[in-house]
Image (spheres, rainbow, N blue to C red):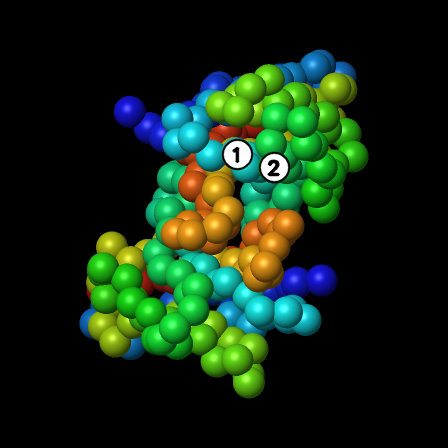
Amino acid sequence: AQSVTQLDSQVPVFEEAPVELRCNYSSSVSVYLFWYVQYPNQGLQLLLKYLSGSTLVESINGFEAEFNKSQTSFHLRKPSVHISDTAEYFCAVSENPGYSTLTFGKGTMLLVSP
Amino acid sequence: DADVTQTPRNRITKTGKRIMLECSQTKGHDRMYWYRQDPGLGLRLIYYSFDVKDINKGEISDGYSVSRQAQAKFSLSLESAIPNQTALYFCATSDFGPPMYNEQFFGPGTRLTVL
């Protein structure tokens, strides 16, 4: 069965500092991996996803994540955060091939302060 | 117009009442899901449906039931609401296979409070 661990429940950083949000998964088969973002009082939006091919995937707002199969990780990084990046971030996994659902981690709250 | 809509957006009810949360989608997806979100627990799957005739229990289905009235509509019912069902509820849809590969699209959420 698939599972996801987000090791940090909260990550406080200063504006313009780099950040890494950690995600590890467990699955016995190939996987698809996703990062979703939830801004305050909103629903979830897809930030980026890994399906196949290049292990480094990028979002339009400067985030990137790298799929590491040997370490079963899909950490999210940004070299310089903005106040507007304050949100909760969820890592999710779906097995491939799949009569399969998404399994979400418990989320990491990114708090960016001036 | 939003692709995935949920009604109501907010609801306050009393213990023992029956509540229905509704979800509609215009994305044409076969797969629909209901989650609840609680602080520190992330999203937990309540029920999911891979097509109109397919309904499956998720991780936390006790106390809930669902109805898939059409491809576009998936309702969640709380037969007899209790306070620990106070949470934020999300509906989501997905398709499977290229190019989406089970990427899920979420509604705006329903905040339910059970007194």
Q: Position of residue A111 (x, y in %)?
A: 36, 61
Q: In this rendering, would A64 be left or right of A68?
A: left
Q: Residue at x 57, y 52 (%)?
A: A102
Name the secondary structure under disc 2. Answer: strand
Classify B85 as above or below A20: above
Q: Residue B69's x, y, as percent?
A: 59, 17
Residue at image coords 61%, 55%: A98
Outermost residue to the right = B62
> In screen coordinates, is B99 left or right of A59?
right
**Mark 2 packing: few (<14 Cα in 10 Å), some, or many (20+)?**
many
x then y, percent, for residue A27: 65, 69
Q: Chain of mark 1?
A: B
Image quadrant assignment for residue A40: top left
Task: Looking at the picture, tell me which residue is in the foreground, B95 or A58.
Answer: B95
Q: Are marks 1 and 2 in contact (CB under 8 Å)?
A: yes
Above-or-below relation of A15 to B55: below
Q: Residue furthest front?
A: B98
What residue would you read off at disc 2? Answer: B50
Q: Which residue is mark 1?
A: B30
Q: Does residue B96 show up?
A: yes
Residue A70 drawn at (x, y percent): 55, 85
- Residue A95 picture quarter: bottom right
Q: Are marks 1 and 2 on the same chain?
A: yes
Report the residue at 70% width, 42% height from top: B58
Quadrant of the drawing holding the N terminus of chain A: bottom right
In the rendered structure, which amino acid carries the disc numbered 2? Phe
* Secondary-structure class at tag 1: loop
Disc 1 marks a residue whose amino acid type is: Asp
- Give the left or right position of residue A42, taking residue B37 as reference: left
Q: Is residue A56 left or right of residue B72?
A: left
Residue for point 39% across, 32% down: B27
